Amino acid sequence: MADILGARLEKLIEDRRTSQSSVARAIGVSQPTIGRLISGETRETGKIIELARELKTSPEYLIGETDDDSPAARIVIAAPQEFQDDADMVEIDSIDMKYGMGGSFLDTDHIEVEKVKFSRSWIRQFTSSPPNMLCTTKGMGDSMMPTIHDQDVVIIDRSQTRPEMGDMIWAVVYSGWGMIKRLRALPDGRIRISSDNQLVRDEYSTDGDLFIVGRVIAAVKSL
């Protein structure tokens, strides 16, 4: 059971442009239960993980262990100068694959590959995969805001291609379009493709029309 901070819960519901009823339905509780959590009448729930996932935050934020309301899936956010001076540098591919956080066409015949340097110790915070399995690209558009902004650099782990953990962020090709999205495997075999921007509707992949390039493990803020 986890202690919920009602003010944070209420603000998240407002920020995500949803309602107490919608959140309650999504996690399998009644609307009055959400209301009691917000009012402080009750401060415990066994649905902390489901609640955090639905509101695209982390359980740690809801219970007051962090002031960062970003989801656990958002491995973020560093400024480049934080690791520019690190002597332990490795090179990884920087690929202009036109990944759009709305959707921009992926021209696989004209991929430009360069090398960029990152601190090995910084990379190790997010993955143990070797550098040759990693790549970076720039996000485009606003469909993943506020988690990832237009022109943020994302780091992709190409060794991870199975969306078994719900709501992680992935670089994908869907019907010929490069995208950065959240994925969730559904019981009927489809995969739900979601944005963090609440104005963008979910899509559903069927019949093998989704190719997963890798999991987004970090995002570097553009300055």
Image (cartoon, rainbow, N blue to C red):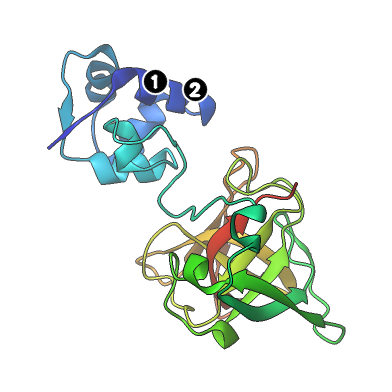
Q: As rendered, which of 88 and 36 lies closer to the eye?
A: 88
Mark 2 and mark 1 in contact (Cβ < 8 Å)? yes
47 horizontally vs 142: left or right: left
Q: Amino acid at mark 1?
A: Glu
Task: Residue at the far right: name it.
Answer: 110
The residue at the point 65 percent across, 79 percent down is 92
The residue at the point 45 percent across, 66 percent down is 126
Q: As rendered, which of 32 and 4 lies closer to the eye?
A: 4
213 horizontally vs 96: left or right: left
Is the N terminus in the top left, top right, bottom left or bottom right quadrant? top left
Residue 40 in percent (x, y) is at 22, 14
Residue 20 in percent (x, y) is at 37, 24
Placement of 170 over or under 143, stated as above or below: below
The residue at the point 39 percent across, 64 percent down is 186
What is the quadrant of residue 86 in the picture? bottom right
State the residue position of label 1.
Answer: 10
Q: Amino acid at mark 2?
A: Glu
Placement of 7 over or under 44, stated as above or below: above
- Residue 17 visible in the current orientation: no
Q: As rendered, which of 15 and 126 lies closer to the eye?
A: 126
137 horizontally vs 26: left or right: right
Residue 43 in percent (x, y) is at 17, 23
State the residue position of label 2.
Answer: 14
Residue 146 in percent (x, y) is at 61, 40
Decide: few, some or many residues near mark 2? Use Cα within 10 Å; few <14, some 14-19, many ≥20. Answer: few
Tell me the element at label 2. Answer: helix
Tell me the element at label 1. Answer: helix
